[in-house]
Amino acid sequence: MNEEVCNWTPQILVELVKAVIWPLTIIVLGFKFKAGILESMKRFFSRNNVAEVSASVTGFSAKFVAEKQVSEVKESTSSMILPDNMTLEAVRERHDKSHTEFSETLYQNIKSHLDALKLEPAEQVELLSREVSLLQSGIRYFDISKVLFRSQFNLLINVGTGENFILKSDVKTHFDEVKAHVGDAFNEWDWIKYVSYLVASGLLIDHNDGYQLTQVGTSYVKFMSRNPQLIDELGKL
């Protein structure tokens, strides 16, 4: 019985390496660049309110998570309003710890402006209180806009035109229409998850068998309507 013996000569080894080196290189580079692309896409979408990115044969699909909206609105609004029981000493201590060179420059500019206006002390307090209220409300509106979807804003407008109230069944219908339009982005969502951010951020409150637009909600809609360029910057869902 004859046995065939494979002689692994140097020439055969060289030819074998030539045959497999490029396929192996392509595979390795493919995995490397795929990981890099996915990481880049994750960073991009994380800056644009996307919490999860997955790759498939049809491309990239973005999945938005309501919990991300809720956590961000809590973080952004938790320290906006001064507590009623904050003492003068506590306020001054907060100023000492929070001020920067830029805030000090703004402070001096504001004082110079007030001096130029030649207002009475009570008028100065009224003017500055009004400015602070506008500033804090503006911060609240911008925090909401960071994670609000365009379709959610459209829902708020619809609620405002319906005596500031909408039935839960109508919210479900609105969500179903949006989901049918955007496809996979809301694949794992239901209407309750969709409306949860609107409630958590104080735009809507649960009322009987529907939702009532709050003071914050109506004010936010008015603010955005006065600044339509901001509406176009909302999340495209």
Image: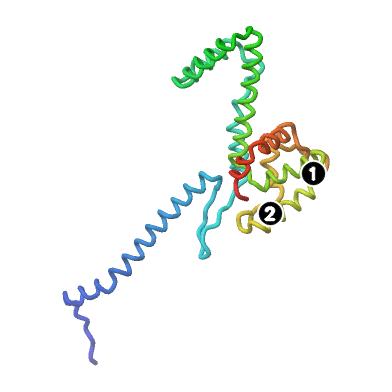
Front residue of 92 and 226: 226
65 relative to 163 in the view: left or right: left
Tell me where residue 37 sits by quadrant: bottom left
Task: Name the spot of residue 100 as percent of width and height, x first.
Answer: 46, 20
User: What amino acid is found at the position of numbered circle 2 in the picture?
Assistant: Val
Front residue of 147 and 65: 147
Circle 2 — which element? helix
User: What amino acid is found at the position of numbered circle 1 in the picture?
Assistant: Ile
* Cβ–Cβ under 8 Å for marks 2 and 1: no
- Residue ID for mark 1: 166
- Residue ID for mark 2: 178
Tell me where residue 219 sits by quadrant: top right
Mark 2 crowdedness (10 Å alpha carbons): few <14, some 14-19, many ≥20: some
Q: Which residue is found at the position 47% from the left and 52% from the top? A: 41
188 relative to 47 in the view: left or right: right
Q: Which residue is found at the position 66% from the left and 58% from the top? A: 181
Position above or below: 8 against 43: below
Say which label, 2 or 1, has the lower sequence index: 1
Circle 1 — which element? strand
Quarter of the image with the N terminus is bottom left
Tell me where residue 34 sits by quadrant: bottom left
